[in-house]
Image: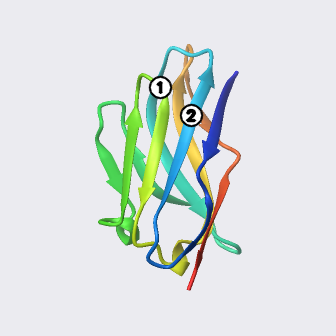
Amino acid sequence: QVQLVESGGGLVQAGGSLRLSCAASGTFFSISAMGWYRQAPGKQRELVATITSGGSTNYQGSVKGRFTISRDNAKNTVYLEMNSLKPEDTAVYYCNAVVFLTYLRNYWGQGTQVTVSS
């Protein structure tokens, strides 16, 4: 069983910063890609940023230059540094990991709320 535990969400004023963390635990061989997605009320879940085990990153256009994704492979942890936050960044942020058991399987965290006030 693999668990993803997120932390770091909260309430912040526009222009502020937050750092999200997501740690994977359980029994597995390795983690391939990790990433962050978000879902605002009434909207579909959308990709925010992903990072491969080798460190290659991909960002949604609206967060480029403001958000930075990184990971610590030794700790099986992925981070999302969010700067210059805007009210439209308000959403529940979900951690995602593609984990290699004896096959690849997709896992999700429980979500953490990020609220940006104007």
What label sits on residue 84 in the rendered view? Answer: none
The answer to whether marks 1 and 2 mark residues whose Cβ atoms lie closer than 8 Å is yes
What label sits on residue 23 in the rendered view? Answer: 2
- Tag 2 secondary structure: strand
Q: Position of residue 113 (x, y in %)?
A: 66, 61
- Tag 1 secondary structure: loop
What label sits on residue 75 in the rendered view? Answer: 1
Vertical placement of residue 85 versus 50, above or below: below
Quarter of image, res 117? bottom right
What kind of colouring is applied to the model shown? rainbow
Quarter of image, res 116? bottom right
Q: Look at the image and tell me in which quarter the C terminus lies.
A: bottom right
Q: Position of residue 36 (x, y in %)?
A: 51, 51
Q: Position of residue 4 (x, y in %)?
A: 63, 35
Mark nearer the N terminus (1 vs 2): 2
Q: Check disc 1: other Cα within 10 Å, few if <14, some if 14-19, many if 20+.
A: few
Vertical placement of residue 101 versus 38, above or below: above
